[in-house]
Every structure is written in C-alpha cells, then in structure tokens.
Image (tube, rainbow, N blue to C red):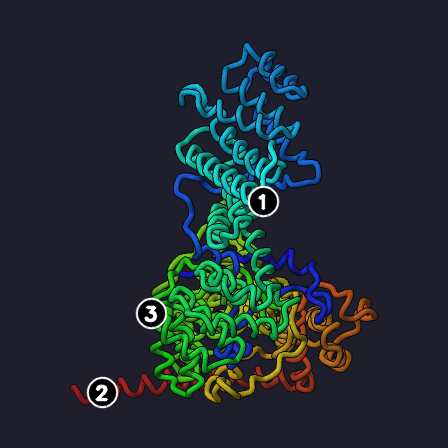
Amino acid sequence: MCSSRTLLALAIASLLPLGATQACGPEFPYRLLSDRTNALGEMPEGNFAFEIARIAPSIQGLGQAGPATLEPYWDENNQRYLDARVGVEKEQLNAERFALVSHLRTLTDAHQAETEGAELPAELRLYTAGAVAFAEHDMGLAADYFRRVLALPAAERAQRTTWAAYSLGRALAEHAVSAPDTVMDEAAALQRQRELRQQARIAFQQARAASVAGLEDPLELGIASLGEEARLALEEGDWSSAIRLYASQSRQGSTTGYSSLRELARQLNRMDDTELRPLLSELEVQQLLAAHLFSRLDAYDTDSKVNQRLLQLLQSMQIQPQIADRLAALSYQLGDYESARRFVTQAGDGGLAWWLRAKLALQDGDKNAAVQAYAKAAEAFPATEDWGLRRAANWSYETLKPRCRIEGEMAILALERGDYLEAFDQLYRSGENYWQDAAEVAERVLSSTELKGYVDAKVTTAPPTTDGEQYSYWNRPPATALRELLGRRLLREGHYADAVPYFTSPELQQAARQYGEAREQAEDAWTTIGRAEGYYRAARLAREQGMELLGYELGPDEAWIGGNFGEEFAKPVQAGGLLTPAEAQLQNASAAQPNRRYHYRWVAAELANRAADQLPTSSQAFAAVLCKASGWINYRDLPGARGYYQRYVKEGPYVEWAGNFGFECQEPDFASARQRLWNERTQAVHQALGSFKYWLPLGVLALITSGIYWQRRRRGLAIVDKTAEETRHE
C-alpha cells in the first residue's frame, strides 16, 4: 500500500493562510474525483530534490547529514560553525588539553602555537598551529601544517585527519586566489591557480575518503567537502563535475547541495543562447535544466516564455536518453503535444514515459490503449518513489507518489466504465494520499454488501496505535477510517449488530451497541412507553455521538476532518464529463437524509419526535422530548425547530419551563408517563361505563341467576338421560 504520512497535519494547517487567491482557512488534500477531466489531463510537476538525486549517486559510507551539517552555520561571522567546533573539542579532549588548545587558538603566530603546544599529541599540536595560520590568512603556512598532520602515521592522526584534509583544501583554495609570492605573467599565474585548485580538490577528496574509512568526522566535513570541491570545479568551468558533486551532497541530505543546484539552474536561465548552447552538450547540464523546468521550481517568477525558450534550446540539442521522458513531460505541460509524442518515442520503458503515453492515448480518444499504458506505468514506478509535496491549482496539497497517482487516474476510468469495486481498490491502495476519493466511492457508490465483503476480505483489522492512545479524526490510518466508515454506514442502514465490530475503540463499540439496542427497542417493545424510551435513547446517542456513529466520512458531515469544515447544504450530484449518470444516481441514492451538514442532528430530532408519538400528549415526557428535538436543530433549522414547538403548543400540556422551549428542557419522565397512561386508560374505562351505573348491577344479577338456572337444568336432563339408558340395558 502506498501509504504516507500527511506532511501538513490538518490541525495545524487550519491555522495557516492560503495563497493570495483565497481567504484564510484550512488547507485540504487534493481530490482526484473533484475534477476528473483535469486529473487525467494534467501532468503533475516533478520534485527538484528527487530530480537532482537522479544526476549522481550517494556516496556509500559517507552517511547522511546530521545536526553538524543541517544546523545553519553560515552566519556572518561563522560563529555557529566555530561554536560547533569548540563543542567537539571540548568533548574530545580532557580539561587540561582543551584549555591549552583554546589558549593556542588565541595566538597570532603559528610557530609560537606549535612551540607552546609541545606537550600535545602531534596531530593536535600541528593542526592547531595550522588553524592559527589560517585565521591569520597565511594560507601557504597553514597548508604546510595541515600537510604535516596528514604525513603522520595513520595511528597518530585518527582525530584530525578529516579536519586536516578539509582545512588543507580550504587553505589551498584561498591560496589560489591570493597574490603569488613572486612576479608572474598571466599564463603562469593562471597555471599556478589551476594547480592549487587541483591540489585543493584532491585534499577535499582525501577528507571524504577519511570519513568513509571511519576516521572521526564529528563536524561532517566529508559531506561539506563535496560542496567545496564543486565550487572549485565551477571556478574552473567544469559544470558537469560541479553539478554531480552538488547532487551527491544533496543526496547525503545536505541542504547546501540542494540550494547550490537551485542557484546554478538560475544562472543557466539567465545566460543568453550563445553562452548557454555550448554547455547544453553536457549531460549534467541538460539534467539540471530539465529538473528545474520539470519541477516548476521557480514558477512564481519564471514565465512561460522563459520555459519555452529553454525547452526549445534543449529540443535543438542531441538529447540524452536519461532526460527524454522529462523533456516529453515538459513539452506536454507546455501544451506542445507534438514534441511530447516525439520525445516519448525516445524515452524507453520508464514509468514517466508510460504515464505520458497513457495521457496522449486519452487525448486520441483511445481509452483501451490508455488503460494498458497506465498499467505499465504503475508497474514501472517503484512503490516507494515519492516526489514530495506539491500544490494543485486550487492550492490543495498532494503528496505525489507516482504509482499511487497513476492508480488513482486508472480509478477514474474504472468508475466511468462501471467497475466500481476495482476503482475503490485502486484508490484505497494509495493510503492517505487519496483517502477522500476512496471514501467517496466506499460511502456513496459501492453497495454496503460490496463494501463489507471487501473489508472482511482485505481489511480484517485496524492497526494499533504506537502509544496506546486512541486515534483521533486527524490521524486515523486508512484501515481504521475505512472500518469505521463501514460501521457508521451499517448503523445508518439499520444493520445494527453487524456494525459494532467495525468500530475501533471499545467505547465506540459500546455506543454503537447501545444505539442498535435502542432502535430495536423502539420497534419491538410491547408497550408504547417502552417504544418511546427506545426512540429517545437512540435520539440522545445520535445527537451526542452522531459524528462518530452516523456521520458521513465526506459531505455533508465531513467526519474525516472531525466535522470542522463543510458546506451547510450538500447539492445533488450531477452527471457530466467523466461522471456517468449511473454513478450519479448511486451517489444521490446514498446521500444523507437530510443532505445537510451534521445530518444526524435531524435524525436525532426526528427520533425524539417519534418518541412523542408513543407518549400521552398530557405527559411531561411528551413536552420534554419535543423540547429536546426543537433545541437540537434550533440554530440550524429554525422552521423545523418551530414545527416541533408548534406541535407541543397544539397537543402538549402546560409546563413551567416551556417559556424557553428548546433551550431549557427537562429530561423526560417516562415513569410518570407510564403511570399517566395507566390512569388515562382506567379513567377512559370508567367514563365509558358511567352511564350504565344503575342498570349494570341488575344486569350482572340477571346473568348470575340465568347461569344458575341453566346449570340446574343441565343436571336434571343428565339424570333423565341416564335413567333411560339403564332401562334399555335391562
């Protein structure tokens, strides 16, 4: 499953502003099914960090950047870096040596530092003397001291090898741009500069090798050396090496490599055609520009004319196979479909190439070819490939995992041809990425039988939390969300016992069980008061825990976001485009009743109204349940609330608290209602028999007398019959 953690938690995102085109409010995830035609038609932009990672490999053994690299230390006075170095020395050295090294660094004479540090190990003494020379900008002397450190036996320089090699590279790089000690002509000066830079690059390579070999590198200088060497390569005009080095630095997790390549891409953009064209013969330059354009990195300040110019320049070059699919995607994004078709023929069998073939087939109206190309694209993309966060045109956010996105687009086509279960499966496999789309199909398109069968077969358990706490609506895994979506749907459809196991927490299971029992009591109780009690218990649960027990995952209740945002009235689904009349009919048939935000409040109010149907109109309970019903919808449906009040006025008894009806309601007293019902029935019998109070005793006496007479007569007849029988036998 292509699950991913949402990069912007909605709880936090709801506090953040949107772009200039929208008012303040929450940030919502991108929905494939909200604009199906656009989802199939657009080619999402790439991710610059991912694209530049394709340029060069990571360096095995160098490790990923940690606090020493990621902590910003390029402040004006380099103070953060110096503080980090002091912290490392304090950890490495005992108090006496740390105090001595700290003193030596305050000196201005490297030779004096070497003399006063005689009691230190050679690597510490020589490196500290070199650091003093470096601070005094005597780069030649500093380089000599760092070389002396590196000349020590390996066992004697375990702590300072990476430091010395890195510092040697920096010293030589600075020395290259300083004035030579002797007068030189221009050619000799340039040669000297090239030689010093080459020596510096070798030193940086030595620093990386030491770090890879496992020598101490607490300041992560091996990673930093990549950027330092890249800068030297760029000064020599070696763009390919510089780009590869920065790309490797970025792959090690350093933001310096990433930001440096961004700046190089901008420099290339600013070049005129004459200056840029020779560089475009280099693969790494092509890759960097393609990465820059395909990711739309600077879309906010780069207009389409600039993109068109760069793309046309790239199209005019002999294109390397490594970027043919990217150029095809760029051409497609810019509406140059002819070029997209031409480049995609050179792009091989990569996932992006098949993705584009699918979209081009859709443009040709060949949906069968598109489905086949989509399947090959999904197979070609690794499930772990992640292009990171992107913004859609409406500012919704999407964590773009190509395989998940492709399967989501396949789901749109599956919905169009009526393969609803297949569409749901493709969307659900995306995990959190397109959960809202999967929920729409599960809740509004599939039958509850289809959904239950899928869940029972493939989502048998919900994952436990790591901390033992219950999931909130903000962080439910898709498996948990799907099971609870099914549980709520089954409760809404009256499958009460079946619904209970799909709720995750014991508390919700108990609440679901109680709701089902209350609804069954309301239908099956022998007495009207018992039925009224069942309706009211169900009404209370629907009002107090309606979101958790009955809420729709999407509209109108938006349970996926805890109901915090949503439209007051949900509109009927209209067929059109890729949304077929058959699917629209299914969605409308499964809509909430009423199709309003927090629809379960109306469910609760109507259940309370049904409770009133079973109660004596003269009882306090009758007034109380109608008061509750009115209050539960008062601020959302004033006419409906008024209707319950008017029923009370027309049929109910006077109660003292009715002056604030709907707001100050007593709990219904069902025991008193039961007694009142008994009293009313007894009184009704008395009233019915009251007009016969004189004749009734005489009638009863006549009935008794008549009964005695007929009983005696039957006995006499029985004696006569017996005598006649005996006579015959004689």
Determine the residue positioned at 48% across, 78% down: 40
Q: Are marks 2 and 1 in contact (CB under 8 Å)?
A: no
- The first of marks 3 and 2 along the sequence is 3
Q: Residue 93 placed where, x, y %?
A: 55, 18
Q: Is residue 274 visible?
A: yes
Decide: is 259 above or below 693: above
What residue is pinned by disc 3? Answer: 349
Q: Nearer the viewer, residue 482 or 369?
A: 369
| Quadrant in which the N terminus is drawn | bottom left
- For mark 2, does the 10 Å Cα neighbourhood hold few (<14), some (14 to 19), or many (20 or more) residues? few
Q: Nearer the viewer, mark 2 or mark 1?
A: 1
Q: Residue at x 35, y 82 (%)?
A: 369
x%, y% of residue 259?
58, 52
Between tags 1 and 3, which lies in front? Answer: 1
The Cα atoms of the two marked residues, 2 and 1, are separated by: 160 Å
Residue 497 seen? no
Q: Mark 1 falls on what kind of element?
A: helix
Residue under label 2, please give it: 725
The residue wearing badge 1 is: 186
* Element type where label 3 sits in the image: loop
Estimate how packed mark 1 is, as few (under 14), some (14 to 19) or many (20 or more) residues with alpha carbons within 10 Å: few
Residue 28: quarter of image: bottom right
Q: Secondary structure at mark 2?
A: helix
- How much space separates mark 3 and mark 2, taking CA atoms? 114 Å
Disc nearer the start of the sequence (2/1): 1
Going by the numbered disc 1, the residue's amino acid type is Glu
Q: Mark 3 packing: few (<14 Cα in 10 Å), some, or many (20+)? A: some
> Label 3 sits on what residue type?
Asp
How far apart in space, not on screen, are marks 1 and 3 (Cα)?
52 Å
